[in-house]
Amino acid sequence: MSASGVARPRAGRGRALIAAERMNGFIDGLFRTQAALVYAFLYLPIVVVVVFAFNANRLATIWTGFTTDWFGIALNDAVVTKSLGNSAIIAFTNAILATTFGTMAALGLQRVGKRTRQGYDVLTYISIIVPEIVIALATLVFFASTFDVVNPVLAGLTGGGKGAFKLGFGQFTIIAAHVLFNTSLVLLLVRARLSGMDRTLVEASQDLFATPWRTFRQITFPQLLPAIVAGFLLSFTFSFDDYVITSFVTGPGSTTLPIYIFGQVKRGVSPETNAVATMVLAFTVGMLLIGQAVLAWQGRRSGSRNGSMANIVTER
Amino acid sequence: MTTSLTPDAATASLAGSAGARAVARATTGVADETTPDVEIVDVTKRFGAVTAVDRMRLSISRGEFYSLLGPSGCGKTTTLRMIAGFEQPTEGEIFLDGKPIAGIPPYRRNVNTVFQHYALFPHMDVARNVGYGLRQRKVAKVEEARRVGEALALVRLAGYERRRTWEMSGGQQQRVALARALVNHPTVLLLDEPLGALDLKLRKEMQLELKALQREVGITFVYVTHDQEEALTMSDVIVVMRDGRIQQQGDPTELYECPTNRFVADFLGSSNFIAATVEGVDASSRTATVRSDRGLVLRGTVTDPAAAIAAGDAVTVATRPERLEVRPDDGAAPGAAPGWTELAGRIRQGTYLGDHSEYRVVTDLAGELIVRRQNTVGAGSALGGGPGDPVVVRWHETANLILVG
Ligand SMILES: Nc1ncnc2c1ncn2[C@@H]1O[C@H](COP(=O)(O)OP(=O)(O)OP(=O)(O)O)[C@@H](O)[C@H]1O
Ligand SMILES: [Mg+2]
């Protein structure tokens, strides 16, 4: 490249090339090592948790032998199963609601003016970008002050007896807070798919005598299904492992698994906690695999390249 | 591919349904055989400041192959979309089968469209695609299967029922799209540049096939294209459009032989244009004598029957390149036979194009003329054709088309 390089005899240039090649090889090696280290940093802790879930020793950090007892103990622990149940109910309800609302919003936003749509886009992105802790705090304040206003009114209406109906923190508030965030997520996923969809398919369907509703059912919905499935699975997992928001708006009797685990860890990591974490991990990975399989099947059916979750999430 | 014979049963059934339609119409008394399938009455369509279609008036007769031909952006697609119901006219009215269709949504119009990029449903196989329209109309399953089979046979895709559409070639997908529309026996079939995505050879085959198919089923076709050759090949009637207005309509021969304005003479084929002033008019034969700006006197036919011209009017004389003859200048004194014009000139450029050659000849009296010469036996090299060679160009007055405006 340099002026002197041009003037040099052929042999010299050859040597320079070889040197450059070696340099490249060295840099390549460096990058590979770095990548390996990053992955190790990310995944080794998980591996450690899983491995120590099978540790026979009561002290989580000293390996003495292999056992599966901790899984049995964890599953027989009423507190664990209760919080697991709570988490499942919350995550599932949240995923259903978020998917429904998100999809409906995406479809609705297709029909409004550009101005309105941009306004909603801003709101959507904000709810995703704003730090979780802020949302958690805001939701807490919102619920607390709403209850302060509503509960006296309710008390007045029902006569204020001891068993009277009263709003309070619990599963309902957790679900409401999770849905808020996850609806935005589903909305974005479905919108991406919708804007990538061939509009003439809808026109072709109408041209072939299908009413708008039948067109939606037979054409639009099947085309959107991969994004809807992806949205459902992501909402489920995000809700299932959420700690920050949940810890703010939880109430008596609605402890979720992450909150339980965090509470345990404060008293030292036990193999039982590791076993719970391992089961959660297995469950989450299982969900992802199922999702992947559904999408691959969908992809084959629709002949599109969108046969993977990663594609849907990164598309547009 | 090239032999386009289709199973008779399928044809008979589709053609029969057209007859049934006529009977149904006769009994309702709404329309009869002579009612045009589509009537567009003074339709204007504006998108904001853009006028896509401007006071269009067009009557599309039953069972004919109509082509809308024009350059990009002239409003062809918009016209189709108004017939299909995807756009509403800003002004004017469209009649389908004699009935006004304003406000009727696309899914309740007995019109089907073949889209440019096929728009096949990717999550359905071929049979489900073709049967889609029938299912919306709640046709029984057995009947659906039978008619889908017939339609596929008609486009020569029998046995492809279970195929995935995206595994098929462009030409095959095009046929599926065609079958999907034809199976519904629409009053009118709309086709928006359906062959645009195919390669040239396949396109030529499909053109002939489409034309043959249209004859067999007897359904009215409205075909959009910006390819003049395609329009000439297939159409019963060509409608030439420009800037949302109809320029001229007629059968291919009429349009080519008798263009009524400069745009049509130029868009359909090509023409030499000579600016001139009218000297005298013979009203009975609709011929006129004109003098070109450089003093060349020509006689020719006034093509526009509606044009009123008088001496002193500015006109344009159009001549087709293949109607001109060119020969080497042998030095003989120019003496033209009656009715013929002979001009000396020099070749500026000769282009060999296989079956014919094209020469640009500069003449004193008519400026640059394009002459097309068929390369018959021995003709290819007979004319030296180097730049600067002296030649003689001659043509008969029947080749002169006098255009107003
Ligand atoms: N939905 C729309 N909104 C705004 N302008 C439009 C719309 N549809 C068409 N137009 C305008 O109307 C004019 C005619 O468009 P149209 O699509 O009918 O042309 P076309 O003859 O089909 O052209 P092409 O050969 O390129 O397909 C163009 O100027 C186009 O920009
Ligand atoms: Mg168009």
Image (spheres, coloured by chain):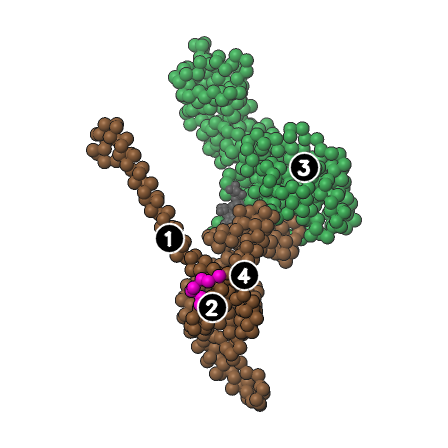
Helix or strand or loop: what does disc 3 sit on? loop
- Disc 2 marks which amino acid? Arg
How much space separates mark 2 and mark 4, taking CA atoms?
Answer: 25 Å
State if disc 2 and disc 3 touch (CB < 8 Å): no
The verdict on a common chain for dots 3 and 2 is no
Residue sitting nearer the eye, B339 or A307: A307
The location of residue B361, given as percent across then percent down, is 43, 21
Q: Is residue A63 magenta?
A: yes
The chain coloured brown in the image = A
Q: In this structure image, what is the colour of chain B?
A: green
Nearer to us: label 1 or label 3: 1
Magenta stretch secondary structure, dominant: loop
Q: Is residue B135 visible?
A: yes
Pointer 3 residue: B157
* Residue B247 visible to an observer of this rendering: no
Closer to the chain start, of discs 2 and 4, is 2
Q: Chain of mark 3?
A: B
* Mark in front: 2 vs 4: 2
